[in-house]
């Protein structure tokens, strides 16, 4: 007898099959009982009028692990259009106490702290599971798109000898009696690897010891990183951003329709050319449209980003907007300045539905320029010697960007908190589960 997944039931109509999973729900309507099994792909219900068929689970709680055998019948009114008749139930792992979060409800009604405290169980809920399956799809689309464009995936160290941005917000740890840090990003290494492969990408965790307590920050997240050489300027990099995003959303549309439908996700259309606005012009626009004078500020606030997102929708019918030319004072020392106006940089942020999603730009590539930049930033050379070695021996003009996976999901799904897009969040107050 075939053991199948719930997602395969439609291909076995009229056949007797076996499914394994969790006891998701039991409903009794008059003399008819419905037993719902959930596996890693979906749910299916078994229907019986014989109470004896339910005897194996009579004393069990939901989330017991079971196997269920029955004949697949096409039933339009059933969830998913399929159900099992003549069910036989086998208990594999009994559960005798109620779950901390009721998973049989269509919508999880528990508050955020409860969901996070009991994430090991709450993440089993079909809606929670769908978020993380979309995360897998986004990573798959990212990798597939870059592979077609001749990128090589690398895995860089997460234990490093110095802070990437040379800032204070790093996690310091004891490394055999010396100091080491958790990597804030793979920035230095992915630049170095441009000298090896020309085009590289990475999917991996990054760590930020920033004391944020907001709905859009956590202290460990997944970064989708890209770096490549022989570019003209940051607009070349922005073109690759567009290609990658289109590839991600194409993958989700093609292979994750069930999850998108369950979560009522509105996939964006990525314009052939994403609109852009210079940082200084963006500040002037905010002053003119909203009467808030942010001119001269070194960065955009979350409210500024929301206003710019609204403008992009109204003026360009776009969920996306590049803000280019951030002040050099707010960018890392390796950022390439604008040759026409060195106070500004050849860098960008991409706003997605009014929230920063991607940061990127052109990097310095000439060794002598790095020495000057480190001097201007009042940074010592010694901690960066191995990084600088790559530039002493020839690097092409290059640039790159990074996408925060959880931020992408939060904006795509309209989630109110980044933690709902994070498998097991790590913030100032949470190291478990």
Image (cartoon, helix red, strand yellow):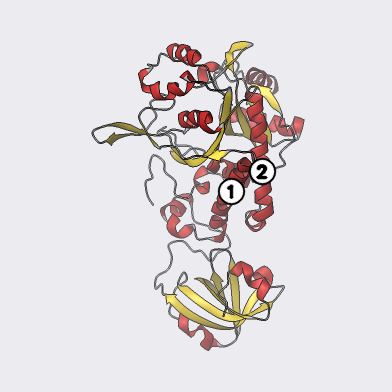
314 displayed left or right of 25: right
Is residue 216 among the parts visible in the rendering?
A: yes
Instruction: Look at the numbered disc 1 and give the secondary structure of its residue.
Output: helix
Badge 2 crowding class, 10 Å Cα cut-off, few under 14, some 14 to 19, many 20 or more, is many
Name the image quarter holding residue 403: top right
Q: Is residue 372 above or below residue 425?
A: above
- Quick one: 129 or 313, which is closer to the camera? 129
Badge 1 crowding class, 10 Å Cα cut-off, few under 14, some 14 to 19, many 20 or more, is some
Name the image quarter holding residue 100: bottom left
Q: Is residue 105 above or below residue 308?
A: below
Q: Residue sitting at 57 percent across and 46 percent down? A: 139
- The residue that disc 1 covers is 140
355 displayed left or right of 112: right
Q: Residue sitting at 59 percent across and 15 percent down? A: 344
| Distance in Å between CA atoms under marks 2 and 1 | 10 Å
- The residue that disc 2 covers is 247
Please provide percent x and percent y for residue 364. 53, 19
- Quick one: 104 or 73, which is closer to the camera? 73
Is residue 414 among the parts visible in the rendering?
A: no
């Amino acid at each position: 007898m075939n053991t199948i997944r719930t997602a395969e039931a439609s291909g076995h109509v009229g056949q007797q099959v076996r499914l394994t999973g969790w006891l998701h729900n039991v409903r009794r309507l008059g003399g008819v009982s419905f037993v719902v099994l959930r596996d890693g792909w979906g749910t299916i219900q078994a229907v019986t009028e014989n109470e004896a068929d339910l005897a194996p689970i009579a004393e069990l709680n939901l989330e017991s692990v079971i196997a269920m055998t029955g004949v697949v019948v096409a039933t339009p009114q059933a969830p998913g259009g399929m159900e099992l008749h003549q069910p036989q139930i086998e208990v594999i792992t009994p559960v005798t106490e109620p779950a901390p979060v009721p998973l049989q409800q269509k919508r999880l009604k528990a508050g955020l702290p409860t969901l996070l405290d009991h994430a090991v169980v709450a993440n089993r809920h079909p809606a929670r599971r769908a978020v993380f399956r979309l995360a897998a799809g986004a990573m798959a689309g990212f990798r597939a798109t870059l592979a077609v464009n001749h990128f090589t995936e690398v895995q860089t160290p997460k234990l490093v000898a110095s802070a990437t941005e040379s800032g204070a917000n790093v996690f310091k740890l004891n490394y055999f009696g010396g100091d080491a840090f958790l990597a804030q990003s793979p920035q230095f290494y992915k630049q170095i690897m441009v000298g090896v492969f020309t085009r590289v990408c990475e999917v991996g965790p990054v760590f930020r010891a920033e004391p944020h307590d907001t709905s859009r920050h956590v202290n460990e997240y997944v970064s989708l990183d890209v770096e490549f050489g022989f570019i003209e300027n940051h607009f070349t990099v922005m073109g690759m951003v567009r290609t990658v995003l289109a590839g991600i959303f194409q993958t989700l549309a093609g292979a994750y329709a069930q999850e998108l439908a369950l979560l009522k996700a509105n996939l964006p259309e990525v314009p052939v050319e994403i609109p852009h606005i210079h940082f200084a012009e963006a500040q002037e626009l905010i002053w003119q449209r909203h009467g808030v004078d942010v001119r001269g500020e070194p960065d955009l606030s979350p409210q500024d980003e929301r206003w710019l997102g609204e403008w992009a929708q109204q003026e360009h019918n776009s969920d996306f907007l590049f803000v280019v030319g951030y002040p050099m004072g707010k960018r890392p020392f390796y950022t390439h300045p604008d040759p026409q106006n060195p106070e500004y940089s050849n860098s960008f942020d991409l706003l997605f539905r009014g929230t920063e999603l991607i940061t990127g730009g052109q990097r310095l590539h000439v060794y002598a320029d790095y020495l000057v930049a480190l001097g201007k930033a009042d940074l010592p050379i010694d901690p960066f010697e191995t990084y600088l070695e790559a530039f002493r021996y020839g690097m092409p003009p290059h640039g790159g960007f990074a996408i925060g996976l959880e931020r992408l999901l939060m904006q795509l799904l309209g989630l109110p908190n980044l933690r709902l897009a994070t498998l097991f969040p790590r913030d100032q107050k949470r190291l478990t589960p």
